[in-house]
Amino acid sequence: MKSILSLIISSTLVGCSMNYTTPKVENPIAHVEADRNEIHRPQVHFSPSQKWMNDPNGMFYLNGEYHLFFQHNPDDSIWGPMHWGHAVSKDLMHWEELPIALYPDEQGTIFSGSAVVDWNNSSGLGSKENPPIVALYTYHNAAMEKQGRIDYQTQALAYSLDNGRTWKKYAGNPVIENPGIKDFRDPKVMWHETTQEWVMVLAQKDHIGFYSSSNLKDWSLQSTFGEEIGSHGGVWECPELLRMPVEGSDEYRYVLLVSISPGGPNGGSATQYFVGDFDGKHFVLDPDWQRELTPTAAMFPAGTVFENFENGAGKWQARGNAFRAAPTAGGHSNQPPPSGYTGEYLANSFADEDRATGSLTSEVFTITEPFINFRVGGGHHPDRVGLQLIIDGKVVKSATGLNRETLHHASWDVSNWLGSSAYLRIIDKESASWGHTYIDDIVFAGQPATNRVEPAVWLDHGTDNYAGVTFFKQPGSKEKRHVFMGWMSNWLYANEVPTEKWRSAMTLPRSLHLVRTNNGLRVQSQLVSEVDSLVEVTRASDRLSPGETISLSSIDNSGRMSALRYSFAVRGESTSPVSVRLENSQNEYVEINIDPKQAIVSLDRSDSGQTAFDEQFGDIQQGELTTVNDVFNVTVVVDRSSLELFIDDGTTVMTSLVFPESVYDTMRVGQHSQPLYQVSLERLGSVWSSD
C-alpha cells in the first residue's frame, strides 16, 4: 500500500492537475420517505423510525440477514424503560425495522446483551434441524434499585425458533444471579473452538468476568480481568472478546473491547480495548500492552485537615433539604452507597433522591497553603452541583463530579490568594438526573492531589461511538469479517440532542482488523465495502492546494441533502500538518487538523451548527494519530447529523455528532495546510429513498 500510494503521488507531482466527474446513476426522481426526511435524520445510518435508541444488542448474521437489536424506549425520545428493538438488513445499509423483540416483565427491564446461533442445539431449546437463536441479556430491576439494593441486575436467556422474528423467555431465568455487584451487566457470548465451549464476557463494575458454559444455560465464572489495568474513569460496560488474525502473519490474538462511561478521552463515554491471549478461562495481556498500560498511583498529600466530616458538620450552615442530615454515613437509605471516601462520613446531597436541593456553607478561613485538595463525586453539573471557593463574594474556583458514585481527587491551586479570607460552599441546585454531589476530606496542603493515571488505548477518539460490538457468526459462516456497529452518541448529552421524533443513530458498519504499527498492535476500523454501493456521483481532483475547495454544488442540484464521502491522500513524512474545513452555505463548519509530526489529530465542531444544548459539545476533540504507512489515506463521511473520520484505513478514527442546518457540501484546504492528493467527493444515496 505504501509503495503504491507513493507512486500515485509522484505521478501527480509531475503531471497536470485533473478534475473529473462521473455521471449520475440514480433515478433523478428518487425521493426520501417522508418519515425519514427530518432535518437531522441520517440518510446512510440506521436510526429508529421514532423514539429513543441506544446500545446495539444481540447482533448476529444468519441466512443472508444481519440482525440488529437495540436498546429502545418505545414511549419517549429520552432514555426510559428498556426494550429490545429489532431491525434486519441483507446488505448492512438498508434496514427494515421489525416489531419489538423483548419487553420488560416482572423480573425487570431489558438491558444490553447478545445473541448467538446455537447451531449444534447445545441448549436443547430447538433441534438439529431447527437450531435456536439464543439471546443472553441483563434484567434491570428498578424496584430493587430504588430500595437501595445493589443486586438488581441479573442475566437471563430468551430464544427464537423462527429466525429471530419472535422470542420466548427461558422459564429458568435468571441464568446468572447477582453476586452482590451494583453494575453487573451486558453479557456478550462467543464460541471458543479450542475448548468447545461457549464463553461469556460480562461487565462487573470496574472489571470483566469470564464465564463458560456447555449449553448456554448453566454458567461458571472462570476468571476476572481489569481491576488494575485500563481506564477506570467510569463504569465498565458492553464488553466483547474477539479472536482476530494479525494482518500479514499467521498469528492470532484476542481483542477485548470494553466501553466506559464516563472516562472517554474527550469526555463522557468511549470504548477502550486490550490485546492478549485467552485459553478459554483466562485473558492475559500481551507483554508490550502490559508495559504500555501500567498505571501511575494517585497521590493525596498530607496537610491541614479543614473538614473530613467525621465529627459532624459544625463548621457549616445548611440551607434547603439536600444536606438536612449532613454529614451522611455513606449512602442514604434509598441509594446504593458511594465509594472513594474515607472514614465513615461525608457530605451527600441525595437526601430526597435527585430532587433534593440546598447548600452547605463553611465558616470563614484564611488561605495558608498553596493548594486545597478534596474528594468529589456525584453528578457532573458545573456551577450547579459540587464545591465552590468564594473570595470577596465571588466564586473563584469550582469543581463538580463525573456522573459517578465514586469520589475522585480534586485540587485547586490557590497560591494567588495566600493570606486571603475565604469560605467554601457545597451546592446542589440540580433536581434532574445525577442531581447530587459527594464531598469529603478537604485538606490545605503544600502539594496538589493527583488521581491515578490509567493509560488506555481507544477504539475511536471521537465523542460519539459507544457500546459497539460485532455481529455473531457461526463456524463456517459465509460472513468472515468482524463487522462492528456502535451507538453514535454520548451519555453527556444523549438525552438533549436537538431531535424530537427520534433520538440516536448507529455508526456506519466497520470491519475490524488487527495490524502492526509503530505503536504496537492496534485495531483498525475500516468502512465495510457495502458503503460503495450507495455512491451516486463522484467528483475527483489529483491535487488540492491550500485555499482550494471541492464541492458537488455546481453539478448536483438534487436538493436531497444527501450524505457525502470525502477522500484524499496525505504525505505523512511532511513536516506540515493537514488542515481541512468541511462547510456549508450557512457558514457552519467542522475543522479537522492532522499533524503527523506531533502525531495528533483534532476535530473542532464549535461552529458546526447547533451546540448550545450542552456546554461541552463544542469542545475540541483530540486523539493520538497512529498510522501504518508514511503516505496514508483519509476518509470522511458526513451525514445530516454526523461525521466519521478514518485515517490510514481506520488505524485512527474519530466519530462525532453535528447538527448543522444542511450537510457540509464543501471541503476547503486550510491556508497553512500541506496539499491534498487523489481527492474525491462522492454523493451517497439515501438508504431510505424509494423510486
Image (cartoon, rainbow, N blue to C red):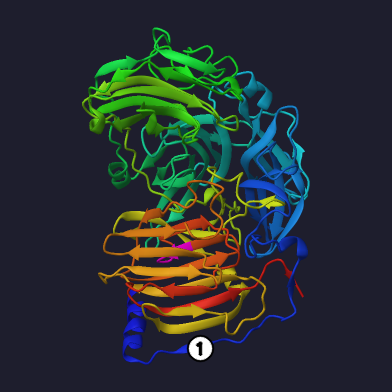
Q: Is residue 527 above or below residue 539?
A: above
Question: Residue shown at 75%/30% (left/top)?
Answer: 171
- The answer to whether residue 371 is visible is yes
Please give the residue where the numbered disc 1 appears in the rendered image: 20
- Residue 685 against residue 235 in the figure, above or below: below
Q: Which residues are magenta?
A: 645-649
Q: Please, what is the dominant secondary structure of the magenta stretch?
A: strand
The kind of residue on which mark 1 rests is Tyr
**Which residue does the image show at 52% across and 82% down from the upper left?**
539
- In terms of secondary structure, where does tag 1 sit? strand
Q: Is residue 647 magenta?
A: yes
Residue occupying the point 26% across, 63% down = 597
Residue 640 falls left or right of residue 425: right
Q: Can I make out residue 121 in this image?
A: no
In-front residue for pair 381/152: 381
> Quick one: 236 or 357, which is closer to the camera?
357
Indicate the position of residue 93 as horizontal and vertical percent values. Answer: 64, 64
Name the quadrant of the N terminus: bottom left
Question: Which residue occupies the extreme front position in the image?
Answer: 392
